[in-house]
Image: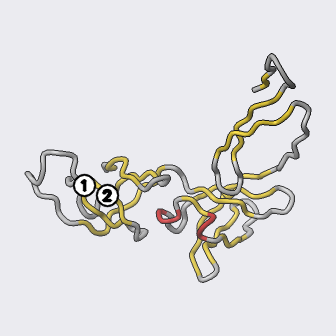
Amino acid sequence: MHVKPGKGGAFVRTKLKSVTNGRTIDKTFNAGVKIDEVRIERRPYQFLYQDDLGYNFMNQETFEQISIQKDLITGVDFLKEGDMVDVVSHADSETVLYSEVPVKVTLKITYTEPGLKGDTATNATKPAIVETGATVRVPLFVNEGELIEIDTRDGSYVGRIKG
C-alpha cells in the first residue's frame, strides 16, 4: 500500500511471504527502492518411498526423481506412497525450497481404543493411529478401520468418510 504522509517522504507498506519457511512479515520500503524478484516454480510430484537420505518423489511429466529432506515437507506425517505433493523450487538453481502435502487427506485408522456409549457428555476425543503411523485425536464414535479426513496443517480431525 502506497502511503504519502503529510510530513516526510512517501513509502510503501507491504506484506511479504518467505519462500523458505512460509511466514508472512510486514515490511516498509521507501518509495523508489528497487527489489529483486525471485522466480519460483511449483510442480506436482508423486511420493515414492522414504530412505536414509530423505523422502523420494517423482515428477509425473519428466519422470525425474528427487530426494527431499523431512524438514522441507509440510504435513509429512500424513504422507503415504503414491500421494501427490506440490514441490516449490527456485526457478534458476532448481533448489527445493519446500514441499506441500494437500491440505486435507483421507487416511484409514489402523488402531484406536473403542469408544463406549455414555463415556462423556462433552466433545471428548481419543488418540487414533492412522496408516502412516501418525497419531490423531478423534471423537469417541470413530472406530478402527474407518476412513477419516485430516487437516495436514495442524493434524486435526476434520470428519469421517462414509462409504
Residue lying at the far front of the rendered structure: 7
Q: Quadrant of the N terminus?
A: top right
Q: Amino acid at mark 1?
A: Thr
Q: CA distance from mark 2 to mark 1?
A: 6 Å
Residue in front for this viewpoint, 107 or 10: 10
Q: Residue 2, how many percent across, how many down?
A: 79, 25
Query: Which residue is drawn at the image coordinates 43% and 68% (left, top)?
Result: 132
Residue lying at the far left of the rendered structure: 118
Where is 84 relative to 133, above or below?
above
Residue in front for this viewpoint, 113 or 121: 121
Q: Is residue 40 left or right of residue 116?
A: right
Residue 51, which numbered label?
none
Q: Residue 119, how many percent across, how many down?
A: 11, 54
Q: Residues within 10 Å of mark 1 (few under 14, many from 20)?
A: some
Query: Which residue is drawn at the image coordinates 71% and 42% (left, top)?
Result: 16
Q: Residue 7, how many percent across, how many down?
A: 83, 19
Q: Is residue 7 left or right of residue 81?
A: right
CB within 8 Å, label 2 to label 1: yes
- Dot 2 lies on which element? strand
Q: Amino acid at mark 2?
A: Arg
- Dot 1 lies on which element? strand
Where is 30 relative to 25, above or below?
above
Q: Is residue 118 left or right of residue 17?
A: left
Residue where numbered disc 2 is placed? 137
Residue lying at the far top of the rendered structure: 6
Query: Which residue is drawn at the image coordinates 54% and 61% (left, top)?
Result: 83
Which tag, 2 or 1, sits closer to the chain's start? 1
Q: Residues within 10 Å of mark 2 (few under 14, many from 20)?
A: some
Residue where numbered disc 1 is placed? 125
Q: Residue 99, how many percent across, how many down?
A: 64, 59
Where is 97 relative to 54, above or below?
above
